[in-house]
Image: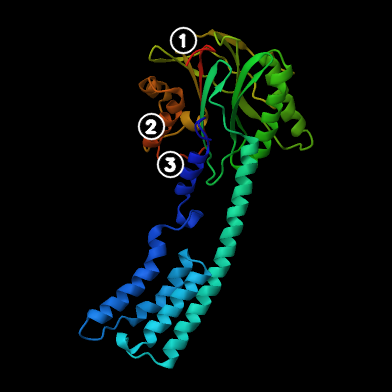
Amino acid sequence: MSSVRGRLPRRDRDRDRRGWLRGAPPPGWARVLPSALLAGVCVAELISPEPLDIGFLLGAIPPLAVLAHGPVATAVLGALVVVVLSVPVFSLNDPGSTDLLTVCFVAVLSVLLSFVRSRRDAQLVTERAVAEAAQRAVVPPLRERVGPVRCAGLYRAAQSGTLVGGDFFDVRAGPYGVRAVMGDVQGHGLSAVATVASLLGAFREAVLDQPDPEAVAVRLDRRLVVDSAGEPHAELFATAVLLDFSADAGVVRIVACGQSGPLLLRDGRAVELDIEPCTPLGLGLAEAAAPRLVSVRLRAGDRLFLASDGVTEARDADGAFYPLAERLPGFAEEDPAALAERVWADLLRHCPDVRDDVTMLVLAPCPQGGP
């Protein structure tokens, strides 16, 4: 996921990161190269006082066109190659009939390959659009503000080309106030999407009819227990942090299930809240001891920063973990919508090769009439 201002910029960045060979549109040089090569050979032959032995380069033009052009453009370039080889003014070593037939065969084969590639690309584009729509239905973008709480989130899936993995978060308003959740299910990538969808569905229902965050946690736990009941070796579980804001966002109640609580950004410092995690979701939370509820009084300007273990457990080349609590105060002056992006950029400098799902959620309480 990206910041709360929308996902289209994030999608464009993901497409750019995929690269040409992973589904992104071909670069401009790939589209220009066949024509430039053809023009270069023709110009070189025309201005050279002696015939040049470069006619073999023309045979590469139709296969190069396949990489970035459709069948029509590939056929046009192939026909131009045959014309250039046949016109005496270019004096391209006087190719015989065998050479011309070879070039014609390569050109026809290139047109066929271009047709197949174009159809395949169109199918992949359609499938990718459907997949992105389905993933956005599971985890829709956050609103910039939910009640008295400003929200910003960032998500980078470990599996390339996906928008949803093993991490999840959501912020919803209900009759009992604004509730937020951030968690991490067992596994990552597309295999975890079903569990994420199940948990988020349970959370959105619980927000409407459960008065306390502990009850919301029990509802999520029961959802996982039921989902894994028919599979004796499923071992389905998840860690999560639940936050419940008062009507004026002056107090937040926090329940941590197998995961550390948020960092509180206050007065330029990152404060680690004294929250003892209880049993992870899916392991029978309702039968264990009641989860510990921690209430924190908030001040104007406070921000709650939640990060997944993809952030805190990222290591540099020397094996050192990313020092989130130390680095976060350096970005304390950032707008909530930009804070997560700044931490992400800093994380990449610390560990360029991040291999886990990375999730960050920034929650900034503010009065209803505030900015």
Tell me how far mark 2 sits from mark 1, CA to CA: 26 Å
Task: From the top left corner, tell me how far across and down residue 3 is, in percent.
Answer: 49, 31
Q: Earlier in the sequence, mark 3 or mark 2?
A: 2
Give the side of residue 8 with respect to residue 27, left or right: right
Q: Earlier in the sequence, mark 1 or mark 3?
A: 1
Coloured how? rainbow
Crowd class of label 1 (few under 14; some 14 to 19; many from 20; radius 10 Å) = few
Q: Amino acid at mark 2?
A: Asp
Q: Secondary structure under badge 1?
A: loop
Camera-near label (2 vs 1) is 1
Q: Which sits in the foreground, 116 or 43?
A: 43
Q: Which sits in the foreground, 210 or 58?
A: 58
Q: Which residue is mark 1?
A: 300
Q: Secondary structure under badge 2?
A: helix
Q: Which residue is mark 2?
A: 346
Q: Earlier in the sequence, mark 2 or mark 1?
A: 1
Q: Quadrant of residue 115?
A: bottom right
Q: Amino acid at mark 3?
A: Asp
Q: In the rendered image of this protein, does residue 9 appear above or below residue 22? A: above
Tell me how far mark 3 sits from mark 2, CA to CA: 13 Å
Q: Which residue is mark 3?
A: 353
Task: From the top left corner, tell me how far across and down residue 322 is, in percent.
Answer: 41, 29
Task: From the top left corner, tell me how far across and down residue 245 is, in percent.
Answer: 59, 13
Q: Which residue is outermost to the right?
A: 230
Give the side of residue 147 with respect to residue 37, left or right: right
Q: Which residue is outermost to the left?
A: 49
Q: Say which residue appears at 64% left-offset and 48% top-offset.
A: 130
> How many marks are shown on the rendered structure?
3
Camera-near label (1 vs 3) is 1
Q: In the rendered image of this protein, does residue 237 appear above or below residue 96? A: above
